[in-house]
Structures are given as structure tokens and as C-alpha cells.
Amino acid sequence: MSLRIGIDVGGTNTDAVIVDDDGRVVATTKSATTPDPFDGIRQSLAKVVQGVDAAEITQAMLGTTHPANAIIQRRDLEKVAVLRLAAPASTGVRPGAAWPADLHRAIIHKAAIVKGGNEYDGAEISPLDEDAVRAFATECAPHIAAVAVSGPFSPASHDHELRAAEILAEELGADFPVSLSHRVGALGLLERENATILNSSLLGVARNVVAGFHSALRENGLAVDSFLTQNDGTLMSSDEAVRFPVLTLGSGPTNSMRGACSLAGLSDALVIDVGGTSADVGILVDGFPRESTAAVEVGGVRTNFRMPDLISVGLGGGTVVRPDTDRAGGVAVGPDSVGYRVLTEALVRGGSTLTLSDVSVAAGRLHGFGDAARLDGLDRQLVDRALAWVDDQIGIMTERLKASRQSLPLIAVGGGSHLVPDRVAGASEVIRPENHAVANAFGAAIAEASGSIDRVYRYEGRGREACLDEARSLAVDAAVRSGADPRKVHITSLAEVPLTYVPGRACRVQVKAAGPLDR
């Protein structure tokens, strides 16, 4: 028997669970996410391992909001240089041209477009200008912490990016951080370039996260393999996370959805995760979150890496409620929240702030959270109006995400899921599985390793099936390199997008494979 620890750092609470080989929950805990998130990680780890034989714990998985918060709050970001290999084909729009001005100033020291890059079929736009790459490295070296390199269609043809990385290593040192776009994003130059720049700027944050995670494990006597969860609900090793932190930006909601799926025993459902500050609604298809088809914005920057299709609203257990006669309904709910301070600020806990947790206690939805007698003087109409707003918001989010008129079950998870009513318009039923309050940490603990490819194939000559077989094989190989058991890897998605404007029956092929970790 071996055990795994799953940890998820949320805006209000840091949750931790221990699960066994069969996916059964052995222990759970919650700790407040204080201004120093590592405090919550340490506290949760210390509590969850009590009474458990540490020698049986072999793996630990972390889902964290650190990188996303760094971008949103514009803090701890490193200065980077941006090198695009695309001239003369792609010079009209400069790297970072559409970025928010404050984020551009915080991250991008200098950007250049030099000759190089490939067309969709692998043909060179022009030979790589190696001298220009060397000159760029020399000029930027004293002012930057990393370099982001991108090129057109590099996920399909990345020889120029690899050669540029070799030159940069010669000029800046073998250990100097260089992010290559074909390893970060899919086809689509500008969005992939944006993701690569963000990745470069987050490398310092990632090093601190992994170092803090390892430190917390050591403090609790745990010598285990460590992983971080990705945007798509799968795992990357902590070593990989140091190099690709941008791939963890949306891991929190995805962990909750994957955990909800497993806890409820469903593969197709709507999921609502309600925390202390916000609520996220997503949809599960074959056990994985449906991915967004639109470009995803992070901190005002468009990217194209894999992210779940979510709708979020400022609705959580710590959300502040105020009477407001100027509003329809006579109540103002949020968007501000007391967050982890709900344990002391809520009225039922002896505080002075009316929160949605107080409203839930008054309405009989939440039990055992404090002294309900402290709400005796609360205006009942105010409670009813606040609950009506909550129910209305949840119903709207549920309806917006449905892909058809068919009703799906709604799985309610998270520490604030008591706010979800027993009946929701558009949902066939509301399910609250056992251990639903720590579904996010459970999702991290049961996550699989994955690999994916995104390439343009010409079916003419080779044939469609031969091309698809190669794509499947490459995705499986990528999953195995990420740590998946080669005997249990399976294809989770395959998408073909015909490029009718390109000769040779060209088609964009996206394949993803996943499997449990190789033990």
C-alpha cells in the first residue's frame, strides 16, 4: 500500500487530502490561506499527516494560485527579452503590442524580430539570422533574467527555435533560462508568444513555489516524488513546473472539477466549486473539463494554452452582504470578500461583517459553523433577498455553460458549496458527494500524467490514418515522458481541423494522451 498527498491552495483555504492506491480518502484537512500561502501549505501538511505512517506516502501533488496571482497582482515578475524568429513575414505586430501598459513595463525589457521561422509545411521563411541572435543576447544580457523565443508554426517545425536556444546558451551560459514557444503553447503565433513571455517572467515565482513545497515536505519528514497540477487537470513533475509555470495558471478550478468527477462517480456533469471568495462553474466531458475554444486572457494578455471553459462570479462563503435600497432587490452582495478571515469576521463567529456564510446559517443551509443565536436580530427579508441573488447567479451560470437543452447533474463542491440550493434550474439534480469540501485537493491527488501534440499534417500521399497513428504515438510518448505508466496510457482526445486553404489535404491535428503515474 502506498499513499498520495493532494494539496490545493485556494484564495481562502488550503486543502489537503491523503488517498490510497484505490483512490479512497484516508485523511482530510483545511487551513486558512494567509498572506504567505506557504503557511497554509505547512499547516495543512502537518495536520493531514498526523496518525499516518509517513513511510507509506510516496507522492505529493500541489495545485497553486501563486503564478496566476503574480500576473494579476503584477508582483514578483522577472524582466525578460523577447526574440521572434519570423522576419520578413511577421513584422507588422510587435511582441507584446496589445498588452496592458503596466504589465508590459513590468516584464518586457526588449523585443526583436529577426530573420528565420517556418511555414505551415516546414519550409523556411528565411534562414535563421544567427548573428542577429548573438547580437541580441549580448545587448540584453545585463538587464534580463530570461529569454522568450517564438516562431511561426514552431509546434510543427521547431528547428530554428532549438538552434536559437543553442546560440543563446553559448552567449549567456548553459544555465540561463530560455523559454521556447513550441514547448509552451499550440499553433497561433501571437497568443503562443504571449504565453511564452509570461512563462519566462514566472520562472522565479516557480522556483520559489517548488522550493517552498519541498521545504514543507521536508519539515514533515516526507521524502517523496513531487508534482504540480496543470491547467488541463493532469500532472507535471516539480522539475518541469520550474520550467513551465505558465501551464499551472488554471489548475485550481480544474482540480476541483476532476475531484468532483471522481468523488461523484460521474464522467459527464456540470460542476460548481464555491470557495470563500468566488464560485466557478464548468462542465465535465468524459471525465475531463471541457476546454475553452476561445483565447484565454490572463491578467489582460491573450494566450492559447489549454484552459478549462469556466464561468466565474464573486460568490463565496466570505462574500460581504449589505442592505442597498438603490439596487433592485434591496441588497448588495459582493464582490468583496473577507476571505480566510470569515472564521473571525462573520457574525456567527463573533465578528462584525455580514457574509454569505451568515446568510446560509440563517437560512438553514449551513450548520455547525458558529452560534446561530448571534443572528437573531437579522432582517429576514435581507436574508431572503441575498439567497435569491445567490440562487439566481448559480442558475444563470449553469444555463450558460450547457451545450444542449438536455439537463445534466450539478456536482456541488468546495467549502462554500452550502450556498448551492438543492434544486437548480437547468440541472437534473444537485449532488454533494462525500468529501466534497476538499474536492480540489482530491483532484490533485488523483491526477494523471499527460502529453499532447499539435501539428499540421498533409494527408495527401501518406494517408489520413498513417498521420493520425503517428500523432497518437507522439502524444503517448509525451505522456510517458511526463511520468505516465506506459501500460496504462490512453488517448483522451483527438481533434482534426481541416485547413481548406492549404493544398495537399492539410489538417491541424491535436491529440492528448493521459495515464496514471508509473509507480
Image: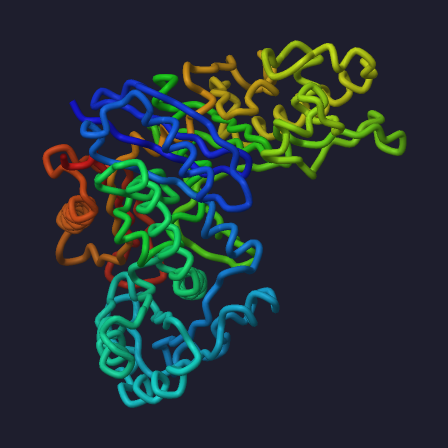
Q: Residue 76 in the image: state x and y as whole percent.
A: 49, 61
- Work out whether residue 461 or residue 518 is closer to the camera in this orientation and state it: 518
Residue sitting nearer the eye, 31 or 518 = 31
In the image, residue 451 sits, relative to residue 443, either above or below, namely below
**Quadrant location of the N terminus?**
top left
Up/down of 234 relative to 383, above or below:
below
Left or right side of 444 for 72: right
- Left or right: residue 305 compared with residue 362: left
> Eyeballing the image, is 217 above or below 506?
above
- Residue 255 or residue 425, whichever sits in front: 255
- Quadrant position of the C terminus in the picture: top left
Q: Residue at x 51, y 28 (%)?
A: 273
Q: In which quarter of the image is residue 34?
A: top right
Q: Residue at x 54, y 69 (%)?
A: 106
**Model colouring:** rainbow
List x then y, in percent, for residue 511: 26, 45
In the displayed structure image, the side of residue 275 where residue 315 appears, left or right: right
Towards the viewer: 206 or 511: 206
Q: Which residue is farthest left?
A: 487
Outermost residue to the right: 325
Give how far across and how far down residue 263 sits, in percent: 37, 19
Q: How many labels does the image show?
A: 0
Q: Is residue 487 left or right of residue 262?
A: left
Residue 28, given in percent of the width and then of the height, sits at 39, 23
